[in-house]
Image: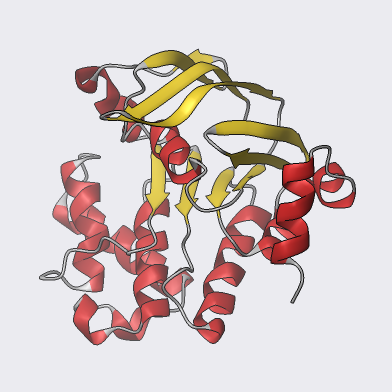
Amino acid sequence: MTLEFNRLTKRFGEHVVLDAISAQIPSCSALALLGPSGGGKSTLLRIIAGLLISEKGSLCLNGILVPNREGELLHYRRAIGTVFQAFNLFPHLTALENIALPLRLAHGMSKVEAQAAAFALLERFRLTEHAHKKPGALSGGQKQRVAIARAASAKPKLLLFDEPTSALDPEMTAEVLDLIGELRAEGRDIIIVTHEVGFARSVADRVIFLADRKIMESSTAERFFSAPQTAEAAAFLERILKY
């Protein structure tokens, strides 16, 4: 994938979250968005996902200008799979139904086709025995694996992860990160917002470092982790890798 931001600006009321950010990301397979809390990472990810619209500027994904109007974003969103930190599963549906329903409503599959595809994913992600359980009966790690299966179900060109392990304990965190690593190894393009810097270092080939509403660094992962170019990035890595 390639990405290009051109003076992208996003505010909520009077609060500026992204302040005219610009960057060109050459071809990569896994991009990590890193930085301190409140730096704009999740907001940028949601703009890339087509879930938020910027006030100014533009975004190109794989050389194509991303629409900036609500009515034009529906088709774009169908080619993106997004996983959130809070799982966002339908509480009244089973794991199987949580995956099958979007395949029917958004991608036009028949009920039989959607259920077959959903069950195959549950099997692929080691969730077969939980197919008929509702989210309330699942552990946090199981919920997130169902959410990842749902995001991957339509074989999107890009998978986005917004702090996918922030609500999980260490054992479940490792389980979910292993699954994301498997998807990366299969050749899926991913963008991930995470505080799991060790994981980002192992899986990403590019890094964007955001702080104070701006992109402070955009470079290869190897360069960022071995020789950060800004004092802000160096201080961030020193703090987060201290323990």
Q: Quadrant of residue 143?
A: bottom left
In the picture, measured across the screen, residue 131 lies left or right of residue 147, that is: left
Give the position of the N terminus as an image quadrant. top right
* Camera-side residue of 66 and 133: 66
In the picture, measured across the screen, residue 187 lies left or right of residue 89, that is: right
* Camera-side residue of 25 and 227: 227
Residue that appears at 49% across and 83% down? 169
Give the position of the C terminus as an image quadrant. bottom right
Residue that appears at 57% across and 15% down? 63
Residue that appears at 49% across and 37% down? 157
Please state the horizontal and vertical placement of residue 233, each as a whole percent of the image. 74, 46
For residue 15, say whether it is visible: yes
* Camera-side residue of 51 and 176: 51
* Camera-side residue of 84 and 182: 84
Residue most toward the left? Answer: 92
Please state the horizontal and vertical placement of residue 66, each as a whole percent of the image. 42, 19
For residue 205, say whether it is visible: no
In the picture, measured across the screen, residue 159 lies left or right of residue 93, that is: right
Please state the horizontal and vertical placement of residue 26, each as a whole percent of the image. 72, 25
